[in-house]
Amino acid sequence: MGLAAVTVATALIGVPAPPAAAAQATYVALGSSFAAGPGIPPPKPGGPAACGRSANNYATLVAARFGLRLVDATCSGATTADILTRSQHGQGPQIDAVTASTDLVTVTIGGNDVNYVGSLFAYACQNTGAPNCPDVDQDAMNTALAGVAGKIGDVIAAVHRKAPRARVLVVNYQTILPRTGPACEGVPLTPAQLRFERTVALRLAAATRLAAVSGRATLVDAAAASAAHDACAAQPWMERFTTSPGRVPYHPNAAGMAAVADLVGRALS
């Protein structure tokens, strides 16, 4: 481990860095697909294939940069319940990966609790004429948004209980849609749908910020950092609904995941 990595690792633990070497710090990554990185090559070996973990997701990039021992528990489709109490694709609740010896935890969660990306997929299905499209229950989404800060807060509190000395970083969801103006080709939303989904994104970001501040965690504001890199931008960090084979619509691309890794790295440094 290089001196820079030693410095960061020991800072996470909360003790002065020795001049030459230090024990390797343990990093646990929790969260949904925006942390797992489905569709970003190459896939990470081990773990349930359905979780869609990429060997280039932000947690893996951060761990390599700072010489941390990574336990990657992220899984596509995860909700706060999948972190706290529920098994997903044969693996236990993600929180099981956190122990008293954990030094750093990152969390990206809440989007699936409010059906954010799921509703974008449903609208795309409806607007492209595909059969058997799901409905979008905006009232149910609004109700879920009203309570999601508390659910994210429950995750942060559980991490603090299991790893009292760990540093906790809450990484919110990158911006998917342009914040102003119309959508673009490959993002099939009506103007009304676009307005609604922008509101969902803003409310989810605000709820995540509230949970982080209330829960004594550090917010890594990927939503703000990616505001000029939405799916319709000239330099997108996000896939459009219409995307290349193997990529996952409305999810971060490799550039977006690397950018989030940089944000997490700056928070640690």
Image (cartoon, rainbow, N blue to C red):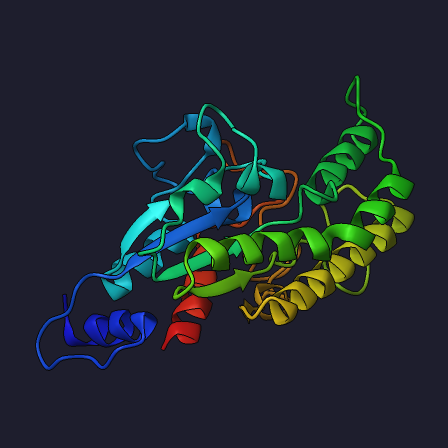
Residue 213 sits above or below residue 54 on the image: below
* Residue at screen point 71% across, 55% down: 150
Please indicate whether residue 137 sits to the left or right of residue 42 in the image: right
Residue 225 screen position, x and y as percent: 58, 70
| Quadrant placement of the N terminus | bottom left
Q: Can residue 158 be seen in this view?
A: yes
Residue ranking furthest to the top:
132
Relative to residue 16, is residue 184 depicted above or below?
A: above
Quadrant for residue 48, please give it: top left
Kindly indicate the quadrant of the structure image that contains residue 206. bottom right
| Residue 231 visible in the snapshot | no
Give 185 or 95, whichever is nearer the viewer.
95
Q: How far across and how far down the image is residue 202, in percent?
A: 76, 62
16 with respect to 204 (left or right) = left
How many numbered circles are shown? 0
Measuring from the top left, give residue 201's x and y in whole percent: 74, 56
On the image, the x and y values in percent for residue 10 come to: 25, 73
Residue at 26% in and 61% down:
25
Residue under the point 87% across and 36% down: 137
Residue at the left extreme of this rendering: 20
Left or right: 182 in relation to 164: right
- Left or right of 47: which side holds 172? right
* Rendered residue at 26%/65% (across/down): 66
Position of residue 161 relative to residue 38, above or below, is: below
The residue lying toward the viewer, choosing from 65 and 129, is 65
* Nearer the observer, 14 or 234: 14
Relative height, residue 52 to residue 98 (above, below): above
Viewer-nearest residue: 221 or 187: 221
The quarter of the image holding the C terminus is: bottom left
